[in-house]
Image: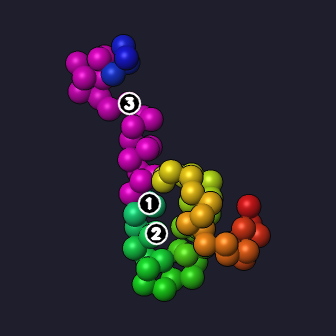
Amino acid sequence: MESSVVGERSGRVPLSEVVADCVKRWFRDALKEAKTGDINMQVLVGQMYYSGYGVPRDAQKVGGCSSCCLFL
């Protein structure tokens, strides 16, 4: 709590918030490309769902794709 108060006073954003926002945007961009049929982005999105990186973890949304999980 104190660090956020200090951050507000100095006009700085905590690094953890910057990284979290970046990861969420990366997921959104990857999902957009995956929906257009990009197989590499489909695998990446599956891995992100499986690990909970940039999105809440949801193994069901991976879709049971065994090839996606080969790299995990």
The vertical placement of 49 against 6, above or below, is below
Three-letter amino acid code at the position of disc 2: Ala
9 or 54: nearer the eye?
54
Residue 62 appears left or right of 14: right
**How many angstroms separate mark 3 from mark 2 (CA)?**
25 Å
- Looking at the image, which residue is at 40% across and 67% down? 29
**How many angstroms separate mark 3 from mark 1 (CA)?**
19 Å
Residue stretch rendered in magenta on the structure: 5-25
Residue lying furthest bottom in this view? Answer: 37
Q: Is residue 19 visible?
A: yes
Residue 7 appears left or right of 58: left
Residue to which mark 3 is pinned: 14
Three-letter amino acid code at the position of disc 3: Pro
Which numbered dot is residue 26?
1
- Looking at the image, which residue is at 76% across and 70% down? 70
Residue lying furthest front in this view? Answer: 60
Given contact means CB atoms under 8 Å apart, are the residues at marks 1 and 2 in contact?
A: yes
Residue to which mark 2 is pinned: 30
